[in-house]
Amino acid sequence: MKTAFKIFLLLAVVGYLVVAVWKFADHAEDRTCEGVRVEILDSIPDGFITDEYIRSILTRNKISPEGMKISDVNLEKIEKLMLEESHIERASCYYDAAGKLYIRVVPQQPILHVISQQGEDYYLSSTGLTMPTAGFNVDLCVATGNITKKFAAEHLLELARFIHDDLFWSEQIEQLHVVSPEQIELYPRVGQHVIDLGNEDNFQEKLHRLRIFYREGLERVGWNKYKKISLAYDDQVVCTKANNIKK
C-alpha cells in the first residue's frame, strides 16, 4: 500500500511539473520579466564581483529586463556581455516559473599577484587570464622579477595553482621571484632561507623533496641554519649554510 502511494505521489509531482513547464512555455511570449536576481558563486569573501557590479553591466549596455516581454529579452546577449568581463569565468541566464530573470555568474579565481620588473601589476587567475588589481586587495602569493604575461600563463600557472590549492604551501610560500626562465626562487614565511627551484619542471616532485627535508632535517637543526636550499638538481636537496651558523 505504501509503495502504491509513493508511486501515485511521484506521478502527481511529475504531472504537475509537466503542466507547469507547458504552461510557462505556451504563454512565454505574453509574459513579462518580473525582476532580476543575481547569484554570485564566489569563494572569496567580499570578492571582485558584487550584485551592483553585475547590474551595472546591464545599465552600461542599456538593458532593463524588468517589465519587458520575456520573448524580447536576449539571454544569450546578456551571457555574452558577462563573459566579456575579465573578472567573470562563467555565466548563465534563465527564468524561473514566476518570470524572474536569474543571472548566475562564477567569478575568475585569482591565484597569484604578479608585479613584474617591467612595471606590470595584475592578478593571474586559475584559468591563466590576467585580472586588474585596481580597487581590490586579495592576500595571495606574489610573483616578481623578469615576468611577461606569456611567461606567467605558460610557466607559472601550474606552480601557482599548486601553491594556492595546497594548505601547507599556501601558508609557507609568500613570494616567487623569476631570476630567469631557468631559475625561479621561492621565499618562505618560516625560515630565512631562499629556495632555488631551478625551472618549473617537475615542481611537485621538487616540493615533495623539500617537504620531507623540512620534516626530517630543518625541524631538527633549526629553520635558520641555511641561507639557500636548492632543488634544481635531480633527487637532491643542496643546502648552503648561513654565514652566522658555525660548522
Image (cartoon, rainbow, N blue to C red):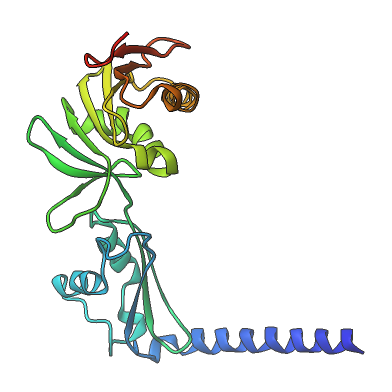
- Front residue (pair 101, 39): 39
Q: Is residue 25 visible?
A: yes
Q: Quadrant of the N terminus?
A: bottom right
7 left or right of 49? right
Nearer to the camera, 135 or 232: 232
Outermost residue, front side:
246
Quadrant, the C terminus: top left
Q: Nearer the viewer, residue 109 or 92?
A: 109
Above or below — where is 2 with respect to 156?
Answer: below
- Give residue 197's position: percent from left, percent from top: 33, 20
Left or right placement of residue 52 versus residue 107 in this view: left
Answer with left or right where residue 34 lies relative to residue 147: right
Whole-percent x, y for residue 204 in the image: 45, 27
Number of numbered callouts drawn: 0
Q: Residue at x 44, y 28 (%)?
A: 219
Q: Position of residue 92 (x, y in %)?
A: 39, 66
Please, is residue 27 above or below residue 111 in the view? Answer: below
Q: Residue furthest right?
A: 1
Residue 222 at x, y percent in the picture: 37, 25
Instruction: Tell me the residue at 24%/28% (across/down).
Output: 151
* Residue for point 39% across, 37% down: 169
Q: Is residue 131 above or below residue 107?
A: above
19 on left or right of 135: right
Q: Residue at x 22, y 27 (%)?
A: 177
Q: Quadrant of residue 19?
A: bottom right
- Residue 166 seen from this side: no
Nearer to the camera, 185 or 17: 185
Q: Is residue 101 above or below residue 233?
A: below
